[in-house]
Image (cartoon, grey):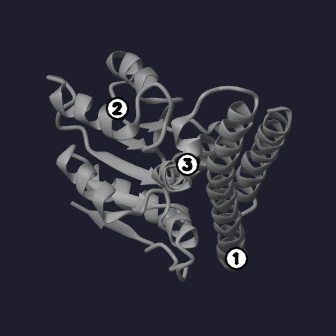
Amino acid sequence: MSKVIMVVDDSSSFRTVVKLALQKAGYLVQEAGDGQEAIDKLPTVKPNLIVCDVNMPRLDGLSFARHVRAHPVHKFTPIIMLTTESQESKKEEGKAAGVRAWITKPFQPSQLVDAVKRLCP
Amino acid sequence: ETARLYAENSMGELLSGFAMLSEHLDALASSPESGRSVQGELEGISVHLQSQDRVAQMLHAVTDDMQRMTSYLNGRDDPAARVPQQWLHRLEASYTMEDMKATHHNQEVVAPPSGVQYF
């Protein structure tokens, strides 16, 4: 059975880019436009891994990551941050929030796929 | 806002075509060499699309700041407008990328590190 990846980003065009890369690698992809929408979809989507941006309206990526880490069902779901944020302080914040990997845009789709395969074998 | 929506719609149409092209190329992957070459082209396009995303974020920060100035000039109170350094500090706080901060301080722009960092 294919693994399910949830892609969380407020840019619909960027979600499409990520979705294409992951679908080509054989994953099922579900999308959310911001952290709050992702929280609402968690019970039905049940992702095996989450790919998430940092800067989003309503609920940002790091707040979403903290919510996932505190969730009784999803607290072990790996989270990859895929973001324009490159500051070390933000990465440290991500690490403290329970994020497993940090990819700075622009990235090669193959880098994302390799990271997903490593964190979600 | 109109221009942004137009750009977003155009991007959506472009990506739909991109998705269709990707599917067709999978079906035509009879030559491994040409398949790898095309795959490389597609990855390059993906990188360019992301670069546009970065530019869009930079523009968003600048246009938001311009909107704040416009509101102030139209009569909305803004204490930061009376202290230029405070205004600039607030603008800098809205940046998400290191190269934006470097440009803000007239420093050399260093390309962001690529690759994946695992924790």
Image side of residue A40 versus residue A25, left or right:
left
The x, y position of residue A94, in whole percent, is: 27, 50
Is the residue at mark 2 from the same chain as the one at mark 3? yes
**Residue visible at 42% across and 42% down in the picture:** A52
Q: Secondary structure at mark 3?
A: helix
Chain letter of the residue carrying label 1: B
Amino acid identity at mark 2: Pro
Residue occupied by mark 3? A18
Front residue (pair B39, A98): A98
Q: Earlier in the sequence, mark 2 or mark 3?
A: 3
**Residue visible at 45% across and 21% down in the picture:** A37
Residue occupied by mark 2? A47
Front residue (pair B94, A75): B94
What numbered label is drawn on residue B37?
Answer: 1
Q: Secondary structure at mark 2?
A: loop
Is the residue at mark 3 from the same chain as the one at mark 1? no
Q: Residue furthest front?
A: B82
Quadrant of the image occupied by residue B26: bottom right
